[in-house]
Image (cartoon, rainbow, N blue to C red):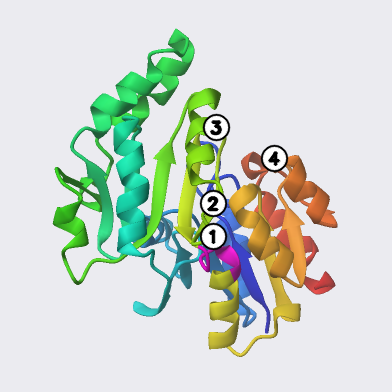
Amino acid sequence: MKLIALDLDGTLLTPDKKISSKDIEAIRNVQNKGHIVMICSGRAPEDVKQILDSHGLSCPIAASNGTFVKIDDEVINMISMNKQEVQTITGKLDDLNIPYRLYTNQGIYEHNEWDKRVYRSLENLDEENKKKFRRFTEKPYNSSLIKRYANLKQIVELGDIYIQKIFILLFERKKKEEVLLNLYGNNNIYITSSGIFNVEIMDRRGDKRNGLRVVAEYYSISLNETIAIGDNYNDLPMLETAGLPIAMGNAISEVKNLCNIITLSNDNSGVAYALNNFLSES
């Protein structure tokens, strides 16, 4: 039995955020042979489950970059940020009027001024990019996934809410550098990115490596018997840990340099190609 960890955006999802029929068929074939396929994504757990359900798939989930692990509707591992740390970081983001979201064990939270901050961030972009990124202000398909708040204390002071990730939206390189400079030297956090326009912050123990290890341990599978497929910076920890790391054809150079195998791109069912051709090599 092997464990295969799949990233979503840029990997299993096509550019239009669907899972191809070839990928679905390949995943089911692998599962029918007794292997475990898990999703290891930066997305929130509710978001991941919604995507899987809409495509008729069922898999263990390591969401919010591996900090929230759920198997058969049971949370088996959760790594949360220190709430005081969250207040300090978001306080600086508020001072800079930067849009951000909090990924928690009870959904995604964003500030009431999210839309205003996104529009302000778009001001210096050309019209084509403004139109492209204006989607961040649109109401999501399942709006219940995102809740809004006026004061962070509303969340922090609730004892049953724990924050796994801060997702920061940044369109300008200068602003991104400013944010990273403010975070530099903080040994309590782990910083990564799933795209050129965002920064993602977790507890220092929280990354996709954790998600892979937790699920492997749950099923008593050696890490040597694991496969990971990804495309971006936040995938590097799980790719470094897996017995067989595979890069998508559309992956960034850092991911491709790490992996011995490069499959097809996400718009050409690269996951299916990998599962059909490289499973025996791990």
Closest to the camera, between mark 2 and mark 4, is 2
Judged left or right of residue 198, residue 104 is left
- Whichever of labels 2 and 4 marks the residue nearer the N terminus, that label is 2
Q: Tell me the number on the disc at residue 250.
A: 4
Question: Rounded to the nearest whole Å, what is the CA distance between mark 2 and mark 3?
Answer: 13 Å
Q: Tell me the number on the disc at residue 191.
A: 2
- Whichever of labels 2 and 3 marks the residue nearer the N terminus, that label is 3
Q: Quadrant of residue 140?
A: top left
- Contact, mark 2 vs mark 3 (Cβ under 8 Å): no
- Contact, mark 4 vs mark 3 (Cβ under 8 Å): no
Number of numbered tags placed on the structure image: 4
Regarding residue 49, the answer to whether it shows in the image is yes
* Front one among 89 and 227: 89
Question: Rounded to the nearest whole Å, what is the CA distance between mark 2 and mark 1?
Answer: 10 Å
Q: Which residues are magenta?
A: 204-209
For badge 3, the amino acid type reads Glu
Judged left or right of residue 7, residue 74 is left
For badge 1, the amino acid type reads Asn
Regarding residue 72, the answer to whether it shows in the image is no
Question: Rounded to the nearest whole Å, what is the CA distance between mark 4 and mark 3?
Answer: 25 Å
Closest to the camera, between mark 3 and mark 1, is 1
- Whichever of labels 4 and 1 marks the residue nearer the N terminus, that label is 1
Is 77 placed above or below 110 here? Answer: below
Q: Which residue is mark 1?
A: 187
Secondary element under disc 4, as helix, strand or loop, is: loop
Bin the neighbour count of mark 2 within 10 Å (Cα to Cα): few under 14, some 14-19, many 20 and up.
many
Is 238 placed above or below 109 here? Answer: below
Q: Which residue is mark 3?
A: 177
Residue 92, position as x, y percentages in the image: 35, 40
For badge 2, the amino acid type reads Ile
